[in-house]
Image: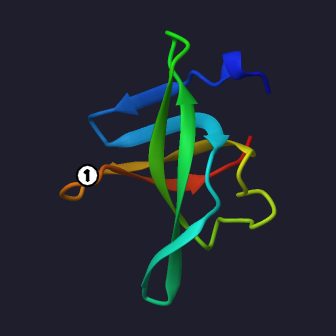
Amino acid sequence: MDEGSLNMLQENSGNNIVSLTGKIVSEPVFSHEVFNEGFYNINLEVARLSQTYDVLPVTVSERIMDRDIFTAGSFLCLTGSRHNPPGRPMWRAKAGTA
């Protein structure tokens, strides 16, 4: 995948669904656990149409996270829901890798 194709960022505010494509720029770091399900934080670099990049924090469930794929330098296509806790915007991934 070339960097020119990393510019997809869509949000449907009606139902809070987000699709992102980008490059992982940090190794997964354990964040928290809920009902025996672990969650990890990664940073995803997403290209804008202006050829600049945003680095977005993403929280991923261990249930969908393959440690061999979720590594720095890997490319991902994610679909999930957007959450905005106080002081830290967060993207929760639900599926997919590029």
Expressed as whole percent of the image width and height from the top left, the position of residue 80 reads 47, 49
Q: Position of residue 47 (x, y in %)?
A: 56, 24
Residue 12 occupies quadrant: top left
Amino acid at pointer 1: Asn
Q: From the image, tell me which residue sits under label 1.
A: 84
Q: Residue at x 61, y 34 (%)?
A: 21
Q: Is residue 85 above or below residue 30?
A: above
Q: Position of residue 41 (x, y in %)?
A: 51, 62
Say which quadrant the C terminus sits in: top right
Residue nearer the viewer, 93 or 73: 73
Seen in the image, is 45 located left or right of residue 89? right
- The relative height of residue 12 versus residue 2 in the rendered view (above or below) is below
Element under disc 1 = loop
**Residue furthest toward the bottom?**
36
Q: Quadrant of residue 16?
A: top left
Which residue lies at the image location 25% right of the left edge and 52% below the top edge?
84
Residue extending furthest left? Answer: 86
Q: Residues within 10 Å of mark 1 (few under 14, many from 20)?
A: few
Residue 54 screen position, x and y as percent: 47, 31
Q: Nearer the viewer, residue 70 or 78?
A: 70
Scheme by which the image is coloured: rainbow
Measured along the vertical axis of the image, is residue 39 above or below residue 90? below
Quarter of the N terminus within the rendering: top right
